[in-house]
Amino acid sequence: MMPPGLPSLSSIEAAASQLASKVLYSPVIPWQGQVKNQLAGENTEVWLKLELLQPGGSFKIRGALLHIALLGEEEKQRGITAVSAGNHAIAVAMAAQVAGTHAKVVMPSTANPARINKCRELGAEVVLVANVSIAFEEVERIKKEEGRTFIHPFEGETTAIATGTIGLELQEQISGLDAVVIPIGGGGLAAGIGAALRQLRPEIELFGVEPTGADTMFRSFQEGSPQRIDRVRSIADSLGAPFAMPYSYGLCRATLDEVVLLEDQAMRAMMAVMFDEFKLAAEPAGAAALAALTGPLRERLAGKKVACIVCGSNIDPATFFSLISEP
């Protein structure tokens, strides 16, 4: 039985139609050859879903555009606000520009400078604060005082419906898919893909991946309720949600088979492999799913047809090469 609050397939299909002219129907590519055989197993069929090619450099544009499409004219005039270490902020800034509204985004001062600059280039006002936890407090203040609509980075049905469109695409693109590996920050991506694929292909295996230094959802699964961490200790800042929330946690808990953890070094190593094998400059979060497939999930998924979500690429060249060069 599907859990209460699960987005319907019809709502996800309607969102796909609404977004069709605005986002990329992101391609899937196979991973083949000696390196794949060595790292993932000769009999494991591996596909990459390239959400890093989306406008704004990540899957986040789907949710940002869908949220804004639901706003009335008065709400658009008041503007929107968001909190993010980068990908969601960039997507909201871009979506606001496309929709003719204005955005104020709150970002931790530790965010990658290239991401901060990108938001400003897209016309957003950027407010920098000490850390992600304070950022959520600040965005609530902005929402209350300025009347802006807050677009949450991962919580809520609209976000799940938007990311569910990725699940629809996978079902259309890859026949007989056995498993999908999905990076998790707050869980909005995994919740939507899980909601779609559990209805389209109930027998499929779905795995979330988190860094050990930002293991909010992993802890939530263990405790049976949304948990929080004191701070993020990972290079994958896109996966650095300081807390889980009820809706996205509930969908992840209902649809995912397991959440596995990764060390930062595994993501660094996979970033280098992806650059060499596919000429893709993925950020750490974008390398997480493939790193999990070749690490903690290798034996469990051996011999199966597996899709890995490459969620984002908002990283500047200096940071990218610095990370893949570390021992």
Image: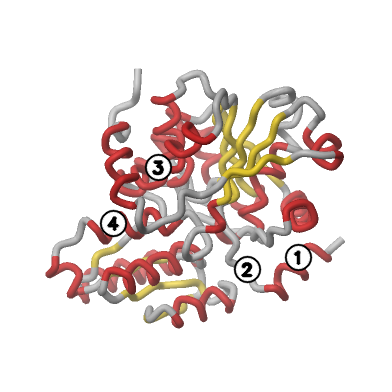
- Residue located 51% across and 81% down the image: 117
Q: Quadrant of residue 34?
A: top right
* Mark 2 element type: loop
Observer-side mark, 2 or 3, equals 3
Amino acid tagged 3? Thr
Q: Position of residue 238 (x, y in %)?
A: 55, 59
Confirm or deny contact between disc 4 and disc 1 (CB under 8 A).
no
Amino acid tagged 4? His
Q: Which of 111 and 174 is in front in this view?
A: 174
Quadrant for the N terminus in the image: top left
Badge 1: residue crowd in 10 Å (few <14, some 14–19, many ≥20):
many
- Residue located 78% across and 51% down the image: 277
**208 relative position to 292: left or right:** left
Q: Where is residue 160 in the image (x, y as percent from the top left)?
A: 37, 43
Mark 1 or mark 4, which is nearer the start of the sequence? 4
User: Separation of disc 2 and disc 1 at Cα?
Assistant: 10 Å
Q: Position of residue 260 (x, y in %)?
A: 64, 37
- Per the image, the residue denoted by label 1 is 323
Amino acid tagged 1? Leu
Amino acid tagged 2? Ile
User: Separation of disc 4 and disc 2 at Cα?
Assistant: 25 Å
Disc marking residue 315: 2
User: Separation of disc 4 and disc 3 at Cα?
Assistant: 14 Å
- Per the image, the residue denoted by label 3 is 165
Mark 3 or mark 4, which is nearer the start of the sequence? 4
Q: In which quarter of the image is residue 303?
A: top right
- The vertical placement of 264 against 109, above or below, is above
Disc marking residue 19: none
